[in-house]
Image: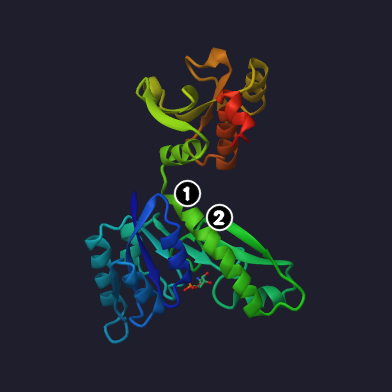
């Protein structure tokens, strides 16, 4: 479970969504540069530690040192910005580099900065939306982790569009933050154990997932020193197995020991295709599940 700090400057509706839908992370601190931010009181009422300090009068450097001390105090591993209206300076960026994310109300790289909805409408765009992205020195410039598109309707104003985009933000941010903090094992576990009547046991020292006693997925981390991180799943037949191995050789491999029986392994190193992993785990579950479960509606 990763310890997350949420930084906000105002209302805090994204913070609320992150708290209410936390998965794979725990909100250990809500911090603000605005002692009057309404979001602080909401968090405090839920027993979440809060901290605030205005940089006015003391300057950015002193403010950020104080913020950093709080991040250390709560052993924060990941920072989620949620309507935080300041650029983070290098002390915080350097300490948590690669572990800071933000939500921005546009389809990045379009419309960095403010007034995103008015700019999208003025440009005649068919869609607005929101993006969760990594935070770097560049304003709204880090790698995009996930986006939602929201249609722009005739007669939309910046306010009406903002309201619909905000609802999309509340759905997107907790999902992307959960994915961001979870290790590949956490994610495989999450996908496998969400399927009916599944359990996890170790088999040959590897986390292995069963439905009604039958194995359908196994995570292998450096199995017999092969240096690979993979998840093994069933295919329907040796023909399907061969077809996958030939058609997408970068993604699928023949796993040792399981290979002859129609299993494939999917590479989880680098930047895996998670929708594909999800699909393959679910299909493998279907191939292993007893008819009783499939007749009951399956997954
Ligand atoms: C959101 O629209 C977010 O995308 C942007 O600032 C707004 C914050 O709203 N970065 P809230 O404080 O989370 O309600």
Q: Position of residue 150 (x, y in %)?
A: 66, 64
Find out whether the residues at labels 2 and 1 contact each other: C-beta distance under 8 Å.
yes
Which image quarter is the C terminus in?
A: top right
Q: Residue at x 75, y 79 (%)?
A: 155
Q: Residue at x 30, y 58 (%)?
A: 76
| Residue at the far top in the pictured view | 260
214 or 258, nearer to the observer: 214
Q: Position of residue 240 (x, y in %)?
A: 66, 21
Q: Residue at x 54, y 74 (%)?
A: 113
Q: Is residue 180 left or right of residue 295?
A: left
**Residue 158 seen in render:** yes
Give residue 79's quadrant in the image.
bottom left
- Identify the residue position indicated by label 2 in the image: 146
Q: Is residue 210 left or right of residue 106?
A: left
Look at the numbered disc 1 and give the secondary structure of its residue.
helix
57 up-or-down from 264: above or below:
below
| Residue at the far bottom in the pictured view | 57
Please tell me how crowded label 1 is: few (under 14), some (14-19), or many (20+) other residues with Cα within 10 Å.
some
139 up-or-down from 36: above or below:
above
**Residue 234 seen in render:** no
- Identify the residue position indicated by label 1 in the image: 179
Instruction: State which tag comes first along the sequence, 2 or 1.
Output: 2
How far apart marks 2 and 1 lie (CA) works out to: 10 Å
Q: Position of residue 217 (x, y in %)?
A: 49, 28
């Amino acid at each position: 479970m990763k310890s997350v700090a949420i930084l906000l400057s105002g209302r805090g509706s994204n913070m609320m969504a992150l708290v209410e839908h936390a998965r794979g992370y725990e909100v250990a601190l809500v911090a603000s540069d605005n002692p009057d931010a309404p979001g602080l009181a909401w968090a405090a009422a839920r027993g979440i530690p809060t901290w605030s300090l205005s940089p006015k009068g003391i300057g950015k450097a002193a403010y950020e040192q104080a913020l950093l001390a709080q991040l250390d105090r709560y052993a924060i591993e990941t920072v989620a910005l949620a309507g935080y209206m300041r650029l983070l300076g290098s002390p915080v960026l350097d300490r948590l580099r690669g572990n800071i994310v933000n939500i921005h109300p546009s389809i990045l790289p379009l419309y960095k900065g403010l007034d995103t909805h008015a700019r999208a409408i003025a440009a005649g765009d068919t869609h607005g939306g929101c993006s969760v992205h990594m935070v770097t020195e560049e304003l709204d410039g880090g790698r995009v982790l996930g986006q939602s598109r929201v249609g722009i309707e005739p007669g939309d104003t910046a306010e009406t569009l903002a309201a619909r985009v905000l609802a999309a933000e509340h759905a997107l941010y907790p999902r992307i933050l959960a994915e961001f903090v979870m290790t590949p094992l956490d994610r495989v576990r999450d996908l496998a154990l969400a399927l009916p009547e599944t359990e996890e046991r170790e088999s040959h020292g590897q986390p292995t997932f069963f439905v009604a006693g039958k194995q359908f997925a196994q995570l292998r981390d450096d199995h017999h020193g092969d240096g690979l991180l993979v998840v093994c799943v069933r295919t329907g037949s040796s023909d399907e197995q061969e077809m996958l191995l030939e058609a997408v050789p970068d993604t699928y491999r023949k796993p040792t020991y399981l290979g002859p029986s129609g299993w494939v392994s999917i590479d989880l190193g680098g930047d895996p295709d998670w929708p594909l992993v999800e699909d393959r785990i679910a299909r493998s579950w279907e191939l292993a599940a007893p008819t009783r479960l499939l007749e009951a509606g399956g997954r």
